[in-house]
Every structure is written in structure tokens, then in C-alpha cells.
Image (cartoon, helix red, strand yellow):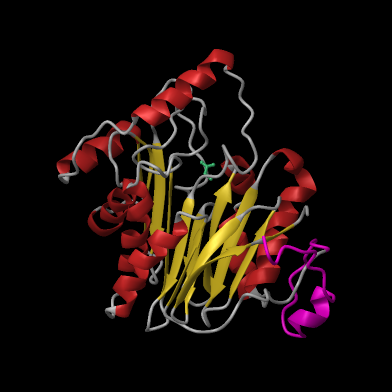
Amino acid sequence: MSNRRSFIKGGVLGAIGATIIPKLISTKTSKTNPNSQKGFPMVISTWEHGMAANVAAMKVLRNGGKAIDAVENGVKIPEADPESMSVGLGGLPDREGKVTLDACIMDETGNCGSVSFLQHIKHPISVARKIMDETPHVMLAGEGALKFALEKGFPKEDLLTEKAEKRWKEWLKESEYKPIINVENHDTIGLLALDKNGDISGACTTSGLSWKMHGRVGDSPVIGAGMFVDNEVGGCCATGVGEAVLKTLGSFLIVELMRQGASPQEACEEGIARIVKNQNYKDMQIGYLAINKKGEHGAYAVHPWFNYALHQGGENRMIDAFSYLT
Ligand code: GLY
């Protein structure tokens, strides 16, 4: 937690300049993130599982590949990793013991695909990609999504690992539903990539909140909530309690703020400010990552301990995000 500190600098109005000034409510707005630099190709993603995901994504970009392929390949790593207990295989189940997955993907042309409440398929991100590439729709859910995936040749698997089942049985003893900050809501992998052509894509995939109600869908498959890309401006992804992100359409908001002149850091801080303004933020963690076309990034969370992986300039490293509460 080397660089966690209060991060209050000068007023946002002066920082943004005289063109279009978004009306911000954040009182902690900072123009830039000191860990931000320009340059691409680059990849950024949420939490520790982002390190390995970034490596896979950067491999695509270094070979001259497109951002859309990089983001899919990247997030497939934690999806397949049973130790990553908030994504794909090994994800913690809902209160009925069922692993249900949400994911979305978006490319530089504004094409997007999404899947929600999907069971038995280890790589929801690739199902979302197929929905984007091969159907006239954006989102498929539940049984229909599973049917589509099976028709496309995805294997049907039991995603509930022994370890996850044990945790669920422990939880059943009390059956108390109160997500623990940075543990139970330490969930989604969101990943954004900027390729050598300067094109942006994003992906987001999760098993959602552990012990959620059966049928609950979070922010991650909702384009504009869990993730959003506008290739003229930038991209954003979210992690944490999806309900708060859904209520504020966080990723779309943050990209639109960047369009109006906010830096990625300013925009992320404002995204959190909108949550803090109206919601019971003390009990939940939410974190945002955003990038712009230059490869600059912003990161901000409600609580401390949100961290992210940044692969840029030949280095892949973990960084602690700044937060509203310190
Ligand atoms: N952010 C993931 C979820 O709430 O499901």
C-alpha cells in the first residue's frame, strides 16, 4: 500500500479548462493520477488476478493483435483459474449453491456482446464475444444463453469446485448475507486494452456477489454499467457491489465525463462521488478504472485496498488505487 494517501489537489474547474465544464460533485477531484503515463499498447485490469490476465492480453498486442482479441484472451485466464474464486470456474456460488456468471465485451466500433445468469460454461466472455460477432443481439441470459453456448460448441462443465462448495456450506450455517468489503465483493475482472493502432476495447467477467439470490444479475454484463468503451474518448470498467454501479450507470458516466474534458482520474473520482452522494457507501466497495486515448489512466474506489494491474512501457505491476475513504 505504498502510495495510499489523501489525494486532494486544486479545483477541478481550473483543471478542466474553458471549453466544456462538466458539473461535478466530487470534492476530492484530482487532475491526474501520479501513476498514470502516456503510451500504448497498454493493458489495465482490476485486482491481483489482473497480473496474469494482462500478460495474456499484452502477448496479443505485442504480436500486433487487436485490442478486442487482447481483452478476451486476457480475462480468460482468471475465468479458467479455480483459485480465482470470483470469476468463471471455481467462482463462489449463489445461496442455492449454483455458480452463475455474467460477462460483457465491447470493441472499438461500439459493437458489444453480453451474457448474464449463465451456468455451466467456464468462459462467459467468449460466449459474449460470439453473441457480439454472430447474432443480431447484444445480450443473452440464463437458459437461452446456455443453449446458444452449447450450440456453439462450448463444453458443459460443473463450475462448483470442492473449495467453493466448502465455503458455501460454511456460509449456509449462518446464512447471513452481508458482503464483506474487499472480500465478498472483491469480484470482477474488468480489463481495458489500447492496441498499437490506438484502438480501445474492454471486457468484464464475474461470478458476481457470493451468496447472492438465485437469479441476481449484477453490473458486469450491463454495457455502460460494468464496462463501456467509446473509441473516440476512452474506456472504463467497474468492480465491487454491482447494484451501486447499476444505479449510477458508472462506466458510461465516466466515459462521458472524459468526453467533456475530465481526465480519467477526475472522471473516476466523480463516478465514486455519485455513489457516495446517495448510497450507503460505508458498507460496500466499488472501484473504477478508466483510460483515455493517450494511454493515461485513472483509478478510484470507495474504500482502501482496491488495487489494479497496469501493463505499460514494458512493465506489468500492481498499483494501489486511491480511495474516497482512507
Ligand atoms: N461487480 C460484480 C457484481 O456485482 O456482480
Q: Position of residue 324 (x, y in %)?
A: 76, 56
* Horizontal side of residue 76 vs 211, given as left or right: left
The residue that appears at 77% across and 64% down in the rendered structure is 5
Of all residues, the one furthest to the front in this rendering is 2
Q: Position of residue 224 (x, y in %)?
A: 52, 56
Q: Position of residue 44 (x, y in %)?
A: 49, 67
The residue stretch that appears in magenta = 1-27
- 167 within the magenta span: no
The residue that appears at 30% across and 31% down in the rendered structure is 143
Confirm whether residue 318 shows in the render. Answer: yes
In this rendering, the answer to whether 34 lies above or below 167 is below
Dominant secondary structure, magenta: loop
The residue that appears at 55% across and 50% down in the rendered structure is 239
Which of these two is toward me, 46 or 30?
Answer: 46
* Horizontal side of residue 64 vs 238, given as left or right: left
- 21 within the magenta span: yes
The residue that appears at 67% across and 60% down in the rendered structure is 1
* Horizontal side of residue 160 vs 301, given as left or right: left
Which of these two is toward me, 4 or 296?
Answer: 4
Which of these two is toward me, 264 or 1?
Answer: 1
Confirm whether residue 214 shows in the render. Answer: no
Of all residues, the one furthest to the top in this rendering is 173
Q: Position of residue 268 (x, y in %)?
A: 66, 63
In this rendering, the answer to whether 7 lies above or below 301 is below
Q: How many marks?
A: 0
In this rendering, the answer to whether 314 lies above or below 245 is below
Image quadrant in which the C terminus is located: bottom right
> Image quarter for residue 25?
bottom right
